[in-house]
Image (tube, rainbow, N blue to C red):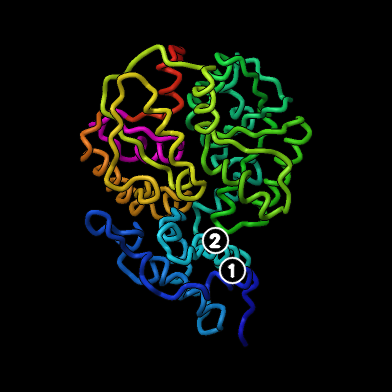
Amino acid sequence: MKKEHLELERYKEEIYHCFRCGFCRELVLGGAYRICPIREELGFETTYARGRIGAARALLEGKIEYSDPLVERIYTCLGCYNCKAHCPTKVDTPSVVRGQRNEIYQQGLRKFKALEEIDSNIEVYKNPYGFGQKMRNQWAEGLDLPKKGELLYFPGCATAYDRPEIAQSLVKVLKRAGIEVAYLGEEEWCCGIPELWNGNLASAKLLMEENGRRFEAAGAKMILTSCPDCYNVFHHHLPQILGKQPFRVFHITEFLLNLLKEGRIGFQKEIKKRVTYHDPCRLGREAGIFEPPREILKRIPGIQLVEMKRNREHSWCCGGGGVVNLVYPKLSIKIAKDRVEEAKETGAEILVTCCPLCYRQFDNRLWEREMELQELIVLVAAVMGIES
C-alpha cells in the first residue's frame, strides 16, 4: 500500500517544478564553478538538488520508500541554498529536504546519536549544547541590561555560549551610540533552528511559540539578532510556520550600517590590511543580506577589501549546516578547508565573517593561523576603540 507523505505534499509544487536542467550542478563564472559542496565530495546524483528532488518525487509517487541509505543521503544536505540561488525556476530544495527529514523523524527512522543528543539537550536545557540556563546569561554580567524594552537583543545559543565576545561587543557598540537594548537572559530559549533542520518540527514550533510569548511579555517591538539562523527563524520561519509576525527583525549588520550612515557611531582606529569576507549561507543566500557587512568593512579606515572568487550568491559553504557538521564531521571539515584555501588565494591577511557557526568551522576545527580570523562585530568594536 502506498504510504502517505503529508510533509512532502506541502512541497508538491516545488517538487514538480524541477525540470532536471542541471543548473544546480555547476555554473560558469570566469571558469566552471560547482554549486553543491556535497555533490563534489560524494559524487552521486542524489547528493545534489536534481537528484534530491527526484527522490522526493519518487517518494510522493510511491515508487520508493525511506530506507537507511536514503535517510543517510537526505541528512548530507547542508541547507546552504546554493542550489536554489542558481535554479532558473527557484525550486526550494532546502525546504523539501526539511520536509523529508520531518517525515523521517515522525516515522522513527532517524538513527543519528548526535541529533538525539541535540533533541535531549533542547528538551531539558533549552539549548543544543546541554549547558545550564544560567550560563546563557554570563556574557551579560556587568552590562546592566533590562529584561524589558521595545528593542530586544536575541544573541542565540551559539553566540551566548560559544562566542560571547560577539554579544559583549555589540552591546558596548550600542551603548556608545546611546541605544539601550533589552535581553531576556536566562528566559531566552533556543530559536529552534537545530530542530527545524534535524527533522523535529514539533520541537521547533514549541521553541518559536515560547520565544514569541516571551518577546511579547517583554514589550519587544523589534528583535535584533547576531546569528543568521536566529534571524531567519524570526524573520522567515516563524511567520511561515505560526502564521504571525508581531515584531520587526534586524540582523546586526543592517542595524550597525544604519548607525554609521546616521553618524551615531564612528571609527577611531585604522587597520592597514587586506581583508576578505566570507558570506554565511544563511545570511547571504537565505536572508539576502550581502552588502551591509561589506559596506561596514569599507568604512573602516585603511582596510582593503578583496573578494574571493566565489562571493555573494556564489559563495562556497563553510561546511557546517547545523546537521552535517554533527553527523558527518569529516565531510564538513573537507568543505571548510576548501573555503579556507579560497580565502588564502586572495592574499588577504584577515578573514572576516559574521556568523558564530561559520567562525567555529574555521577556528575550532581546522584553522592553521596562516590568516587572522575575525568576527565582524568584534572588529567593529575594536576600531571604535572599545575595549573587550
Q: Which mark is residue 11?
A: 1
Picture coordinates of residue 213 (x, y %)? 76, 40
Quarter occupied by residue 245:
top right
Question: How many callouts does the rendering have?
Answer: 2
**Percent position (x, y) of residue 70?**
45, 71
**Viewer-proximal residue, 316 or 364?**
316
In the picture of the structure, the residue carrying the numbered disc 2 is: 95
Q: Is residue 135 above or below residue 241?
A: above
Quadrant of residue 370 within the rendered picture: top left
Residue neighbourhood size for the residue with mark 2, other residues' Cα within 10 Å, grouped as few (<14), some (14–19), many (≥20): some
Which element type, helix, strand or loop, lies under badge 2?
helix
Q: Marks 1 and 2: CB-CB under 8 Å?
A: yes
Element at badge 1? loop
| Residue segment shown in magenta | 350-372
In the foreground, 44 or 50: 50
Q: Nearer the viewer, residue 43 or 327?
A: 43
CA distance separating discs 1 and 2: 8 Å
Locate residue 238 relative to residue 90 in the image: left or right.
Answer: right
Image height of 355 relative to 203, above or below: above
